[in-house]
Amino acid sequence: MGGLRISYGLLTSRSLSNINTQLRELASIQEKLATGHRVNRPSDDPIDARRAIEIRTSIFQNEQYLDSINTVSPLLAETESVLRSSNSILQRAQELAIRGANETIAQDQLDQIALEINQLLEQFVVDANRETNGKHLFGGNRTTTIPFSVTRVGTDITAVSYDGNSDVIELSFSASGSTAINEPGDAAFINGVDIFQLLIDVRDDLRAGNQANISNVHLDQIIAAQTQVLNSVARIGAFTNRIDRIDSTVQDLIINFEEQLSNKIDADFASTVLDFDIKQNAFQASLNATARVLQPSLLDFVR
């Protein structure tokens, strides 16, 4: 048998193929150095690439939860502030009612007390209809509807009606978890003691000189109303505390997921630099070897 004869064309083709393979490997390592990632596309590592997609999805979902928390936190703070203001109004109403129950004061003084009670009523309605970022705080889940509407005779409020509902708004903080983030207006201001009607009655009884009704009925009602509002404050405080804990938990989850993602796709910088040096030296060696085998004109073309 004669010896195997390798044609010049085959030698050229194989040399070029080897150089191109090494160029692709160098380009891949350069990409890792540039991005800092070992996995830049599914073909780099299909299993880790799929896990990375799942982790990124989890990070995105939890970032959405954080965005929601950042949106509702000011609403909760505003709600608590309004409720505390409402309680302050009731405390002042109690002081005025005690003064109005004193049988030694004249009717003109009762009228002056009634005038201040009327102003407290007006402020109470304003607070109950408080709006923040385009959303009413005390309308249940009817946040775009003014929750309390008034009926007037002349300039005086004679009745207040609730146009919201009793539904709570739920904030989702995981695939299966949620928490309430609002206090419906009926729970805070109407159920148990209708505070609007109470202030109306106190005002009207002062004007009528009906001090016995203030002493025997309304003073106890004001105390009950304060307890009612403070219970709402406590509920909002509990919601706020839970939101704060959820916020901390979600942030920890995101950090954990980011660490998992880094473990799956990040390149080891020192190892990658070493690998690049090795591949670059091998590529130069291939070029030198090819230069000795192929014609200079072809080598020039490759370079």
Image: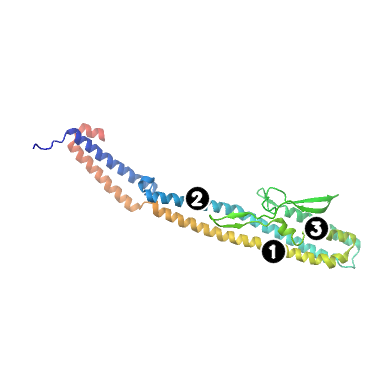
Q: Quadrant of the N terminus?
A: top left
**Residue 159, percent from left and from top:** 81, 53
N-terminal-most mark, 3 or 2: 2
**Residue 40, percent from left and from top:** 39, 46
Going 21% across and 40% down the picture, which residue do you hit?
A: 288
Instruction: Tell me if 69 is positioned left or right of 93 in this view.
Output: left
Q: Which residue is identified by label 2? A: 60
Instruction: Tell me if 234 is positioned left or right of 205 in this view.
Output: left
Q: Residue flagged by tag 1: what amino acid is it?
A: Asn
Q: Which residue is identified by label 1? A: 231
Which is nearer the eye, 98 or 157? Answer: 157
> Which disc is residue 6 wearing?
none
**Separation of disc 1 and disc 2 at Cα?**
36 Å
**Separation of disc 1 and disc 3 at Cα?**
19 Å
Q: Quadrant of residue 299?
A: top left
Q: Which residue is identified by label 3? A: 197
**Separation of disc 3 and disc 2 at Cα?**
48 Å
**Residue 105, percent from left and from top:** 89, 66
Going 21% across and 35% down the picture, which residue do you hit?
A: 12
